[in-house]
């Protein structure tokens, strides 16, 4: 990700989401 944006917001996950949750959310995009 080149842009400095709030990827938590983009992925729709909370700030304290686990890396596993982040991966799952990222795959949905």
Image (spheres, rainbow, N blue to C red):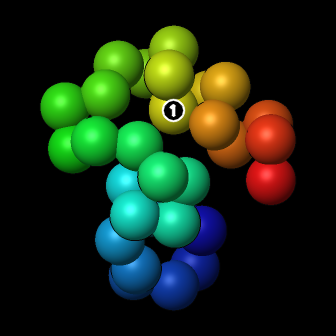
Give the percent coordinates (x, y) of residue 7: 45, 63
Quadrant in the rendering for residue 14: top left
Q: Is mark 1 on a helix, strand or loop?
A: helix
Tell me the residue at 80%/41% (across/down).
Answer: 28
Count neighbours of disc 1 (C-alpha within 10 A) and say few if under 14, some if 14 to 19, many if 20 or more: some
Tell me the residue at 79%/37% (across/down).
Answer: 27
As drawn, the residue found furthest toward the bottom would be 3
Total numbered labels placed on residues in the image: 1
As drawn, the residue found furthest toward the left would be 16
Tell me the residue at 55%/54% (across/down).
Answer: 11
Give the percent coordinates (x, y) of residue 25: 63, 37
Question: On the rendered structure, is 11 left or right of 29?
Answer: left
The N terminus sits in image quarter: bottom right
Query: Is 5 located above or below residue 24 in the figure?
Result: below
Question: On the rendered structure, is 15 left or right of 18?
Answer: left
Give the percent coordinates (x, y) of residue 20: 51, 14
Question: On the rendered structure, is 2 left or right of 9?
Answer: right
Query: Is 20 located above or below residue 9 in the figure?
Result: above
Label 1: which residue?
A: 22
Tell me the residue at 21%/44% (across/down).
Answer: 15
Query: Is 23 located above or below residue 20 in the figure?
Result: below
Of residues 23 and 13, the one nearer the viewer is 13
Give the percent coordinates (x, y) of residue 22: 51, 32
Query: Is 19 located above or below residue 16 in the figure?
Result: above
């Amino acid at each position: 990700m080149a842009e400095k944006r709030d990827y938590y917001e983009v992925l729709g996950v909370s700030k304290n989401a686990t890396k596993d949750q982040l991966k799952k959310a990222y795959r949905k995009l």
